[in-house]
Amino acid sequence: MGTKWRRILVAALLLASVAEFSVRGPVRIARAMGWNDFLSPYIQAKAWVHGKDPYSAETLVALWPADNPRPEWVDADAVSGALERKRGMPTPYPLTSLVVLSPFSLLSWSIAMPLWIVLSVTAVVLAPFGLISICGCRLADLRAQLFLAIAFALAPLHTGIATANPAMLAVSLTVGTVWAARSGRTKTAGVLLAIAICLKPTVAAGLLLYYLIRRQWKVAGTATAVAAAIASVGFLRLGLAGVPWLASYFENTNRIFSSGSLADFTRPGTIRFNMVNAQVLFYSLLGSASAANLAAWCLAVALLACWLWLCWRRRTPSGLLEISAIAVISLISVYHRFYDAALLIWPLAWSLLPGIRRSTSLPILATIAPFLVPGPTLLTDLAVQGHIHPGIAHGWWWEAVILPHEIWALIVLAFLLLYDLSRALPEESMEAAEESSATAVRPGPAPS
């Protein structure tokens, strides 16, 4: 196929992915303005501002926004404790998340919600362009256009936007952090990383570990100091108000992760396969919650130890590759829903953007491909409608292989990235680019 036709094909794919992103993301959330993942932290942030217990269901009901009609069952579920188990409300987000979101709580729901959507969508749209800049590519490059086409087609991004989940902003901020650090704006990078960690520690903590292991003290130090300051403000506000929030937080967390709850990886049925952490897979294989937890943690610790050793062993760091690997590893060990897999934009960028041929590029893309659709949900619907043979939908491999196929893909992807990291690739480090950018008049492209 000639270059002209390749460009036409990639342009068509890009247009299609942007259309899909728009319909499955912003359009869907526009139809769910009253009930979404932003509602609970918005109310909880308001509770923090008013010096009330943000992890109490009673407080959640009392501070429900007047311009957002409350479903009748909310009051009954709040009294019985079912609100946490069935709906995940109030959320067990750390206090730092509520401090960061507190400016939105000063606005009415009818204003705060559209503003949050605009912020989230803008951040998600800018993130792939930031990765292109980080890799020193041009938008005219065919690889860059193909990367954009696949990035905007990733289903976790659609789901995250459609549910208004704060994870989308946190993922985008990790990209902004690396872009700022590469541009020599280390303090800005640290602040962005701190906000990402405060919003979603399980999403952004891996990037902080990367900067620590690479001894980028300005970025890591600033991030730690700012995050500590935000946490101190959160603790001080409730402490001065005399609110026993810590006990409520632990009780709230226990209910949300209790047996049969929304976040229970042993929950009967297929809804648990909307999670991508390895506990879901190992429970299907082992049939024991404790064994599944142990197996998942052993796998995660082994992968993390391997990542640390390889990072220490490499004299020439590989920023994009190392970040991609730790991002995938962080998805494996602890609770993560499908939208958190938006972190896959990092390994996607690694496989496409740097102008270096690698034998594992196609396998990496193959492991990311399952996330172009919400697989478990789609397969479950097909089985319920009778489009999948009962012999398949009721076989042992249905819950051990087919439904958790995205988790299998993440595990394989982690090994592929570690394999790439073990190879001696002649590439320039992003750290070198960061240092040179401060002195060079016109810094050239810095491949990963």
Image (cartoon, rainbow, N blue to C red):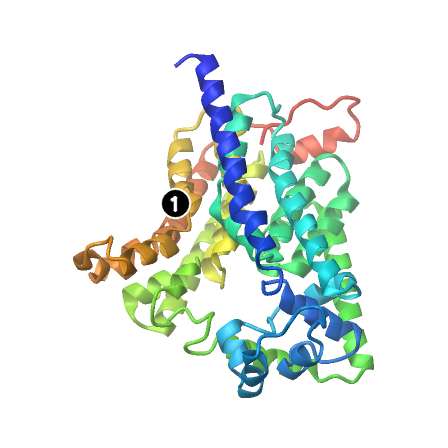
- Figure quadrant of residue 197: bottom right
Residue at 48% from the left image edge and 52% from the top image edge: 329
- Residue occupying the far right of the picture: 240
Residue 173 % position (x, y): 66, 48
- Residue occupying the far bottom of the picture: 79
Relative placement, left or right, of 347 versus 369 is right
Q: Which residue is mark 1?
A: 370
- Figure quadrant of residue 73: bottom right
Relative placement, left or right, of 83 versus 105 is left
Residue at 56% from the left image edge and 21% from the top image edge: 141
Q: Quadrant of the C terminus?
A: top right
Question: Where 356 falls versus 290 (above or below)?
Answer: above
Residue 374 % position (x, y): 42, 51
Q: Nearer the viewer, residue 370 or 324?
A: 370
Can residue 23 be seen in the rendering of this structure? Answer: yes
Question: Where 367 falls versus 430 (above or below)?
Answer: below
- Figure quadrant of residue 370: top left
Callout 1 amino acid: Pro
Residue 104 % position (x, y): 75, 61
Task: Give the structural element (helix, strand or loop) at label 1.
Answer: helix
Residue at 71% from the left image edge and 67% from the top image edge: 98
Question: Where 294 falls versus 116 (above or below)?
Answer: below
Relative placement, left or right, of 212 versus 321 is right
